[in-house]
Image (cartoon, rainbow, N blue to C red):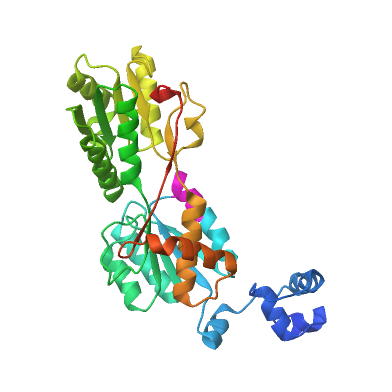
Amino acid sequence: MNKSKQPTIVDVASEAGVSIATVSNVINRRKVPMAPETIRKVEEAVVRLGYRRNVMATNLSRRRSYELGLIIPHFGGYYGRFAENLEQKVHHFGYHLSIFSAAGMDPEIEQRHLEHLLQRRVDGLVSHGLAMSMHSTQQLVGEGTPLVIFNGWGWPNEIVKMAVNLDFAKASSEAVQHFLANGCRSVIYAGRSKGMGANEQRIQGFMAGLSDRGESTVHALLDAGELGIAGTLDEALRLSGDLRPIGIYTFNDALALELLALCHERGISVPEEIQLIGMDNEFFSKSSYPSITSFEMPVDLQTSLVAAFLMRQIGEELDEENTQLLEEYLPRVTGHELFIDLEMIVRKSSGK
């Protein structure tokens, strides 16, 4: 073969001794019965010849790019785990996932993301509810791009057909009730207003948890972004007066850890004087002293549902496992929102 010529799918088929259709099935990861030996031969032929699939030509012939987009607020913690898990899920369907960060909701970067996604003619988009404006998202939907939102509350139905949300409100209510059951006489929510919808969901659940208790309880909503860590702790102590222990529920585990460190510095005993509950169940939560009570984020389940809903919108045939998953969770959808429960992991920072 002429070395200056780019190898084609015909060359790969000839090298592997199989049909062109078989090569196409292997490189596009289609779920058709194939012997492992056949797959091995095709993959080795691809490597030997240096074959690369012509994506644009493929797009024109099948009207599908097998490209998906994911937009997340940033790459840390839960969002990084979500991206990695979703990438594995869509790979199972033969799709490639391009991942973008909202970069602090910078409108110029958002516009570049939008233009790139439109140019690539992505077959579908997954976006965090805070990672892209409704206007930009509507542009993609207007182009006919299937969309699934995760952790997006209150999006209009004409933009979003499905939102797969973690039930932060329910978890927050459970955190308050846990404090009250543990004898806390004052309960504080230390939030992050920059968390927008996610913060609002936590506040909603926090207040609901208090309303379930007949007697009056000292409580407050504090913005740790405005007050800082020291200011948040000072205000919690001031508002609570002599009432002990104080239960402080935080926006995430990082904030809980910062408050815990400050309590150690000031000689404030945790959990005797202050009890702490975080969110995200980060790796350091169980390693801190005392270990931090938190909520496990069901990333595997959430990404499985997001992938299944998106594939169904695109028109892919679902296997038995994904079909059963949707059959189980579809009855729980309210409007176009599905809420997934979080599990509280009780540790020493919130008492027994």
The stretch in magenta equals: 75-83
Is 112 drawn above or below residue 269 in the view shown?
below
Residue 1 visible from this viewpoint: no
Count of numbered labels shown in the rendering: 0
Q: Relative to residue 52, is residue 203 drawn left or right?
A: left
Q: Main secondary structure of the magenta part?
A: helix
Check the picture and name the quadrant holding the C terminus. Answer: top left
Question: Is residue 86 inside the magenta stretch?
Answer: no
Identify which residue, 157 or 75, lies in the foreground.
157
Residue 8 at x, y = what percent? Answer: 70, 83
Q: Quadrant of the N terminus?
A: bottom right
Q: Position of residue 47 (x, y in %)?
A: 75, 69
x and y percentages locating residue 216 in the rendered image: 17, 27
| Residue 82 on the magenta span | yes
In percent of the image, x 72 and y 81: which residue is there? 22
**Vertical placement of 58 versus 131: above or below?**
below
Asked where in the image residue 30 lies, by quadrant, the reply is: bottom right
Name the one closer to the observer, 81 or 271.
271
